[in-house]
Image (spheres, rainbow, N blue to C red):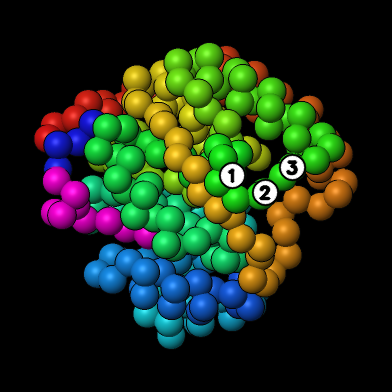
Amino acid sequence: MSSTSVTTRRVLIVMPALNEEASVSSVISQVKKSLPGMDVLVVDDGSVDSTAKLARAAGAEVARLSVNLGVGGAMRTGFRYAAARGYDVVVQVDADGQHDPDEVAALLDGLNDADIVIGSRFAGKGSYKASGPRKYAMVALSLVFSRLGKTRLTDVTSGFKAMGPRAIRLFAAYYPAEYLGDTVESLVMAIRAELKIKEIPVIMRERAGGTPSHSPVKSAVYLGRAGLALLLALMRRRPAVDSSDSA
C-alpha cells in the first residue's frame, strides 16, 4: 500500500463510455463539481454517437478506441494512461450516471489501508437489489472471493472502484478485456499479487441515459458465464509483474 498522503495524491477519474451521449456531459459536470482539481479521462470505447465530442466539450480528456473492446479494454487504456503520467490513484466511474461522484471521497479514504477499494451496492447502504440468475451469481462469487481474499466481499462485480499505485502498476501491465474480466479476473490477479482489497457501502443510482449492458437474455446466462470466467481466471498464470510498493 502507498504511503503517499491523501492531500498529495494525484487522482485520475477514468470513465469508460460506449454511446453515452445522453449522460456523459452531466456526469463529467458532477465529477468536476464534487471532485475539484481531479483529472477526468473518458475512454470512448468505439462509440458511434457524439460521446467523445461531448466529453471534450465538458472538459475531460478523451482517449478514443477505434473498435469496441468492452469495459476491460477501456480500463486497460486508462491504467496505461495513468501509469505513463504518474498518477497515484485511478477511480473508475461509469459514464451512465449510476456512480455518485459524492461517494468517491469515501473510496479514496479507503485507500489509506488498502490497494483496491470496491464500492458495494450490498453492504448496507441504499436499496439496490439484484434478482434471478444475476443475484445467484453475485452471491456465489462473493462467497468465493471472500474466501480467496480473506476478507468479506459482497459485490465483486461492482465497477465503482478506487485503485492505488500497486494496482495501477499491475493493471497497466496487463488488464483482462474478456467478458467479466474487468471484475472477476482482475480481482483474482489482485489477490494473487497480494494486494489488499476492501469494500465500502455506496449508493448506486439509476442510469441517466444510454442502454444497459446486460439484457434479459444476457442475465439468463450470467451465472454460467460468471462461473466460467472465474474458473479461467484461476487457471490462468498471472503475468510476472512487480507490484511492490516503492513509496
Q: Position of residue 194 (x, y in %)?
A: 34, 20
> Residue 121 — which label?
1
Q: Which of marks 1 and 3 precedes in the sequence?
A: 1
What segment is highlighted magenta in the picture? Answer: 5-13
The answer for how far apart the CA atoms under marks 3 and 1 are is 10 Å
* Neighbours of disc 3 within 10 Å: few (<14), some (14-19), many (20+): few
Q: Residue at x 73, y 65 (%)?
A: 211
Q: Nearest the camera: 163 or 63?
A: 163
Question: How many numbered badges does the structure rendering display?
Answer: 3
Q: Amino acid at mark 1?
A: Arg
**Residue 199 in view:** yes
Residue at point 61%, 26% (across, down) = 142
Secondary structure type for disc 3: loop
Q: Quadrant of residue 7?
A: bottom left
Identified at 45% across, 40% down, the residue is: 200
Residue 177 visible? The answer is no
* 69 horizontally vs 42: left or right: right
Q: Which mark is residue 128?
A: 2
Residue furthest toward the bottom? 57
Whether residue 73 is in magenta: the answer is no
The amino acid at mark 3 is Ala
Q: Are marks 3 and 2 in contact (CB under 8 Å)?
A: yes
Q: Quadrant of the C terminus?
A: top left
- Give residue 130's mark: 3
Q: Is residue 238 above or below residue 211?
A: above
Label 2: how many Cα within 10 Å (few below 14, some 14–19, many 20+): some
